[in-house]
Image (tube, rainbow, N blue to C red):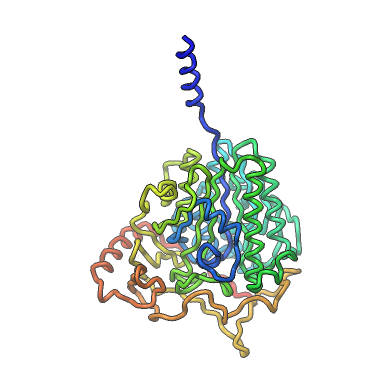
Amino acid sequence: MLPRLFLLLVLCASTIAAPPPNVVIILADDLGFGDLGCYGHPKFKTPRIDQMAAEGARLTQFNCPAPFCAPTRSSLMTGRYPFRCGMTQNPAPDGGPAADALALRKSEVTLAQVLKKVGYATGMIGKWHLGHKPGSLPTDRGFDEYYGIPYSNDMRPVQVLEGVEVAEYPVVQATLTTRYSKRATDFIQRNKDKPFFLYFAEAMPHKPLAASEKNYKKSGAGMYGDALADLDDSVGAVLDALKQNGIDGNTLILFSSDNGAWFGGSCGGLRGMKGTNYEGGYRVPMIARWPGKIPAGQASNELTVMMDLFATVLDVTQAKMPDDRVIDGRSLMPVLTGKAKSPHEFIFGHLNSKLATIRDARWKLHVLPASQMKLKAGPDGRWADPREPDGVTILAPYEQYNLDAHPGLTTGVEPARMQLFDLQNDPGEQVDVAAKHPEELKRLKAAYDVMNKDVPEIDEVKRVPIK
């Protein structure tokens, strides 16, 4: 009788459901593919992020669907390509009435809304950039609480919101990363006894770069290195909070960037930068850590894309999306555990409302000519940012980077339609091989045409030039 009772107790214990995992997504702003130590940068020091990578998985072919802010963030929040959720351009409070009114459509369902329905506490800190008018802020889209600048830290007015109210103006950006970190650790502490989702959208290293007194002029790698030191400390603070609260082993952390680097950063030997349709605009770091679930020391070259983070979170939390819409992301757990190949045969890249590129594991086709940064230099050879300082926004105006600090390759064939690049042998997109591989061009174009049938005609917003 006793052995049977013991066996019954063991079986009952084994069927008790494990507590739902916590989820933390940390999204850097304009962090380039080559900006981190664990991605090969020789000068920028990021020991806490590097350690996170050593304790989890690091992806080397992770892509954004667009080379700038809001479209990528919409894909992260919805699991859908920007053209599906109508978020193909950046909202801008200082870009004229049309840009000021841009926002994620009300019909879209965000990751926060999905998780909130299954009992998660939901908090957001930092840059939202999916609408800054009443009805479009994070607390309107599934987050229980919000603290941050709702758009880029150079858009006017630069102000921090607490929920929907202005909490700080002007903003002291030198302490912003540190204060964001304190908010993040506080959220973790307050919600340690229940499942939570924390979306931590960092301000750095978006321009204007700013660094705390602790790290200013201490990195030995200029203002960019100083700002990355703050970012690294911030990630470390989150990791420490999880451990100190005893929930490290039940928390999935995903770390990435919304697009490639701006001037001063590094795209890791790729061509182009933020705002371009070369790999330097699309490819970014992605690190995942979950002790006991994701084996330490994983490095994967499998093709992945931002929407996969959405699908991964749904997978591990068992949350369900409405079945009335296409979800483009796929769970990365099989890839992160080293058990599977990429869930994608192809991924696509946006140029505003149009699909501009298609690529697979090796080949990339520029159906449209690649976009390039078009910043006009003044008589002194430097570009002048048209946005004037707002309060104490520009703390070190003469230490901000300029045209002579391009983060990516600027060489290679001139942009044109239907250019094909062999990313396996030419990751810098220098030589068009369309004439040598017409069969690959034809194959990719056929797949592009299938997807492009779903792309609606979208009236693009003309932003008012900033003077």
**Near-viewer residue (238 or 403):** 238
Instruction: Identify which residue is drawn at 45% across, 72% down.
Output: 270
Q: Does residue 204 lie above or below 403 as drawn? A: above
Q: Is residue 69 left or right of residue 167?
A: left
* Quadrant in the rendering for residue 62: bottom left
Outermost residue toward the front in this view: 3
Q: Is residue 305 left or right of residue 432?
A: right
Give the x, y percent position of residue 284: 49, 63
Q: Is residue 192 left or right of residue 20?
A: right
Instruction: Identify which residue is drawn at 34% across, 61% down.
Output: 360
On the question of residue 55 being in view, the answer is yes
Q: Quadrant of the C terminus?
A: bottom right
Q: Does residue 153 lie above or below 432 as drawn? A: above
**Near-viewer residue (434 or 217):** 217
Outermost residue toward the top in this view: 1
Outermost residue toward the left in this view: 439
Q: Does residue 24 lie above or below 62 as drawn? A: above
Give the x, y percent position of residue 305: 44, 57
Q: How many marks?
A: 0
Instruction: Identify which residue is drawn at 49% across, 66% down.
Output: 67
* Quadrant in the rendering for residue 429: bottom left
Give the x, y percent position of residue 256: 53, 58
Give the x, y percent position of residue 233: 66, 58
Q: Is residue 292 left or right of residue 172?
A: left
On the question of residue 461 being in view, the answer is no
